[in-house]
Amino acid sequence: MAAFPFEIEATDGKARTGVLKTPRGDIRTPAFMPVGTAATVKAMTVDQVKDTGADIILGNTYHLMLRPSAERVKRLGGLHKFMRWDKPILTDSGGFQVMSLSGISKLTEEAVTFSSHVDGSKHVLTPERSIEIQADLLGSDIVMQLDECVAWPAEEARARKGMELSARWAKRSKDAFGTRDTQVLFGIQQGSTFENLRRESSERLREIGFDGYAIGGLAVGEGHQAMCEVLDYAPGFLPEDRPRYLMGVGKPIDLVEAVARGVDMFDCVLPTRSGRHGQAWTWDGPINLKNAKYAEDETPLDPDSDCPASRDYSKAYLRHLFKAEEILGQVLLSWHNIAFFQALTAAMRAAIAEGRFEQFRRDFAARHLGG
Ligand SMILES: CNc1nc2cc(C(=O)NN)ccc2[nH]1
């Protein structure tokens, strides 16, 4: 039973725009979720994040279970109170980061066991424990099943094994989650780049029944074109009346091309991580502010933006901050990049609502990739 109403307001081809209504607030889709890894969107205050127009942020179970621990977050009132973010939070299951960040990890039918990258301590993550951490201890609004994200490239037999384990863990996750009024559980489609496996994964998830469906196992090195080839069919295997969330994606062009193929929600560290390293994302493509050509460029990143970081500071000043390794550079560029990703999703929502998404898609690519 769907706890969060998802109202699709308009479609344009496969693209959709709508609202996912949650007790902590509405999420306008297509939506970009800033990544708030260790209870912070790095280098930003929650007020700055809110100021960009973000309706929801992502929290990482792996990081928070290691530090400060999920039990401590619970004792301190849960993740929303702890970090002072009162809008919706989606937490991931921890599975992906165990494989990409932790020390030795062992995967069995029962669980993933791993050693912490923080202090080497041993931890066990089962579908049931991940649900407990996300739903009961962190108190997130949108909970993700524990699954296995198979590395790319994968042989079909290996991808099938991972997809089938993820499907069994989807059932265990749903049973552990039970029925709740103010929180929902999303299943995750796996199957690497194999159409038959993606279809089978989707059929198994639909039989179990989820409030939303993620497309996992992409943006793992396959590249933009191969990802788009999977997205030509993978979103359509999922229920059209529920949100579709593409995990870990991506660059601005990835968002536009995925929305064109029916995706509604995204998360990616790109805007904050690249911002910390001096890369600014703009309608004309990415620029590296450390480049000497900006040394006396008095123009702002985007004079039309309502974000102070984009509108009020010269590129010359931002370059200076990065050359001097001043923390303010990382703050301002993270703020600008998140504001740009929010402006991009807002522009896509408007284009879909007005039936001009294909034109938007062409104009964006020409300008952003035009060079
Ligand atoms: C940056 N690329 C990227 N791919 C991801 C895939 C998953 C996934 O399949 N989780 N079950 C999660 C995060 C990801 N981030």
Image (cartoon, rainbow, N blue to C red):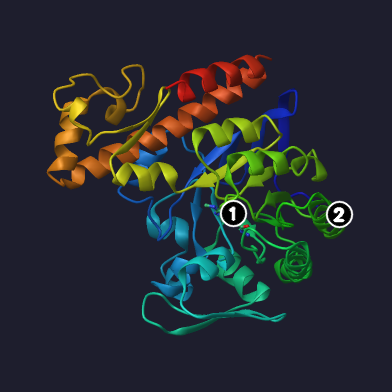
Neighbor class of circle 1 (other Cα within 10 Å; few <14, some 14-19, many 20+) is many
- Left or right: residue 153 versus residue 330 is right
Label 2: which residue? 203
User: Is residue 297 in sight in this rendering?
Assistant: yes
- Left or right: residue 259 versus residue 221 is right
- Left or right: residue 65 versus residue 263 is left
Q: How many discs appear? A: 2
Question: Is the CB of the residue bearing disc 1 within 8 angstroms of ligand 1?
Answer: no
x and y percent of residue 159 in the render?
A: 73, 63
Q: Secondary structure at mark 2?
A: helix
Q: Which residue lies at the image location 22% right of the left edge and 37% below the top edge?
A: 290
Q: Which residue lies at the image location 40% right of the left edge and 83% below the top edge?
A: 120
Q: Secondary structure at mark 1?
A: loop
User: 36 or 138, which lies in front?
Assistant: 36
- Left or right: residue 36 versus residue 347 is left
Label 1: which residue? 141
x and y percent of residue 243 in the render?
A: 70, 42
State how far apart marks 1 and 2 are (Cα): 25 Å
Disc 2 residue type (three-letter): Glu
Q: Which residue lies at the image location 67% right of the left edge and 65% below the top edge?
A: 147
x and y percent of residue 298 in the render?
A: 18, 19
Q: Quadrant of residue 292?
A: top left
Query: Is residue 337 placed above or below 366 in the rendered structure?
Result: below
N-terminal of the two: label 1 or label 2?
A: 1
Disc 1 residue type (three-letter): Asp
x and y percent of residue 85 in the render?
A: 43, 49
